[in-house]
Image (cartoon, rainbow, N blue to C red):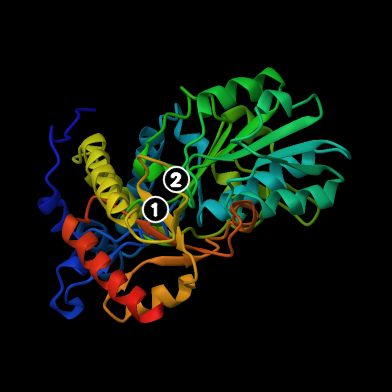
Amino acid sequence: MTNNRSTQFEPNQFRSQFPVLNSSENGDFVYLDSAATSLKPQVMIDALQNYYSKHTATVARSLHKDAMRITADYDLARQRVAKFIGATECDEIIWTSGTTESINLIAQSYARSLLQPDDEIIVSDLEHHSNLIPWLIVAEQTGAKVTPWAINDIALSSLINPKTKIVAVTQMSNVTGYCPDLAKISAVVHNYGAVLVVDGAQGIVHNPINVVDYDIDFYAFSAHKLYGPTGVGALYGKKRLLASMPVWQGGGKMLTQASFTDFTPAPLPAKFEAGTPNIAGILAFSATLNWLEKVEISAANHYVETLADYATAKLSKIDNITIYSVPNSPLISFTIAGIHHNDIAILLSEQNIAIRTGELCAQPLMKKLGCQGVIRLSFMPYNNHHDIDNFLNVLNDALLLLK
């Protein structure tokens, strides 16, 4: 396919495509919570509205004209996801409701049928709860154990062993922005015959990945962090692994025959997609991916890094601040001694500034960092220096009030 991306990135033009930032109702709205969920471009909103207002139909069932057209568009969406992450076959892409459901699917279908007592699942200490709790559940179900990996302190090669069956790691920490070396991790994991599961929810937004080049076994991400709608996610799995896995949920279209004694699962990917999918969301995400084809992602990401560097330099001058995020990260997490993070969030919200505070669904990492919560700013290419200056001005006023 022809590369339609521009050779440069235009921040103002990009920002203009997000209606929430251009609405008079929102005033001077500053959105610095994109790691929680991104803002949505008009093209995504239009696709969602178009489905519900003009061409509503189900997929892979009815034979009327709209249903056939929507089914074709639905199939194209899967192709776009496969292309975006470098998967070789569309059948390796499973639609889910998001990263959380994807990892639960792996745990309950792949891991539960594989694990034996005393087998090990290595989970890094950077993980969001969505890449920890499913492993704790399946470990309890099978007698396996979850082994924490202090990723910045211990080499994986000194921890992994013949009992290790799965290694679960994030592509990018939602707290520190740290990006593990997935190529190195993959090599170690496969040297022991284990399987690598990568949570791409944060990483895919800023560092598009090729799952084949990195030899990743399972890769999960959510559309809503990548400018898409909520309630849509994609799970990539190597075809041989997906084909060997038992079905997880039963219902319509995940079978080829059924009786009161048995059923025959459908081929991939349908065997893991029981029931009516989130058609509107998937079509809207497809439109989003098509839109992203025209964005120079590397230039956009470089722009985001300059914003984060600018904000970090300003924040570093604040007394008693501790910054936990790594350099060249699209997010900044910090605490200010003597100030509760939620007090900051409330005062900023009163001035129309959105940030995230708290444990960020990463309690083990918070304990390691020695804090009960952080203040997090997360940037996207639709942000600008005015957003940061506005935030800093209100933050300084808040600190004067709270100290």
For mark 1, does the 10 Å Cα neighbourhood hold few (<14), some (14 to 19), or many (20 or more) residues?
Answer: many
Task: Say which mark, if any, is on residue 358.
Answer: none
The spot of residue 85 in percent (x, y) is 41, 34
- N-terminal of the pair, mark 2 or mark 1, is 2
| 222 lies above or below 124 | below
Location of residue 345 (image quadrant): bottom left
The spot of residue 355 in percent (x, y) is 37, 66
The residue under label 2 is which amino acid type?
Gly
The spot of residue 94 in percent (x, y) is 52, 44
Is residue 315 or residue 327 the one in the foreground? 315
Q: Residue at x 29, y 61 (%)?
A: 39
| 347 lies above or below 95 | below
**What whole-number distance in Å separates the C-alpha atoms at marks 2 and 1?**
8 Å
The residue under label 1 is which amino acid type?
Ile
Q: Are marks 2 and 1 in contact (CB under 8 Å)?
A: yes
For mark 2, does the 10 Å Cα neighbourhood hold few (<14), some (14 to 19), or many (20 or more) residues?
Answer: many
| 341 lies above or below 154 | below
